[in-house]
Amino acid sequence: MEIPAFSIFSAISELFVTAGVLYSVISNLRGEVFRWKLLGLVLVFELTVNIVYMTQRASAADSSAELSTALKLFYAGHGILSLIMFLTLCGVYIAAVSDLGRDRETWFQRHRTASWVLIFFWMVSVSTGEAIFVLRYLV
């Protein structure tokens, strides 16, 4: 099976998106300045490129006769989790940016446990996405 070029691009770019998310959040949790421009750029890229592409791929996967029901459910679970994580991160990003210039900690610093939970579920979302790529095209 030939791998669509944009699927390769999306799988690789998602790793860079995740690196940007992890760097922005974890460095801020460690007391460094909040890299809000980096995280904002990553979120815009995620929305305009990866989410739009995955939405198109989801409609094709839903109607695919070659995918088992279990695999379709796995794809759907990944998609739902990924959308929830993206929207959650966007909301938290807005809260953290609004904290800038107020002489107080950012949202990430004030909510350390929630930040680590967010990172955990972001990683689950990315890992399942990469697993879908491997299962669909490389196995």
Image (cartoon, grey):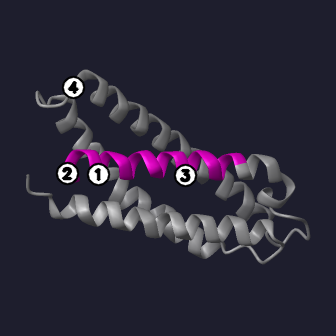
Q: Residue at x 41, y 56 (%)?
A: 47
Frontmost of labels 3 and 2 is 2
Give the residue at mark 3.
Answer: 123
Magenta residues, dominant SS class? helix
Q: Which residues are magenta?
A: 117-139
Cβ atoms at labels 1 and 2 below 8 Å apart? yes
Residue 119, compared with residue 55, is above or below; it is below
Could you tell me which secondary element the residue under label 3 belongs to?
helix
Q: Residues within 10 Å of mark 1 (few under 14, many from 20)?
A: few
Distance, label 1 to label 2, CA atoms, is 5 Å
State yes or no: discs 3 and 2 in contact (Cβ < 8 Å): no
* Of the pair 103 and 57, the residue shown nearer to us: 57
Q: Which x, y percent locates residue 57?
A: 23, 44
Q: Earlier in the sequence, mark 3 or mark 4?
A: 4
Helix, strand, or loop for circle 4?
Answer: loop
Where residue 122 appears, as percent x and y from the top left, is 56, 50
> What residue do we see at 50% from left, 61% from top?
43
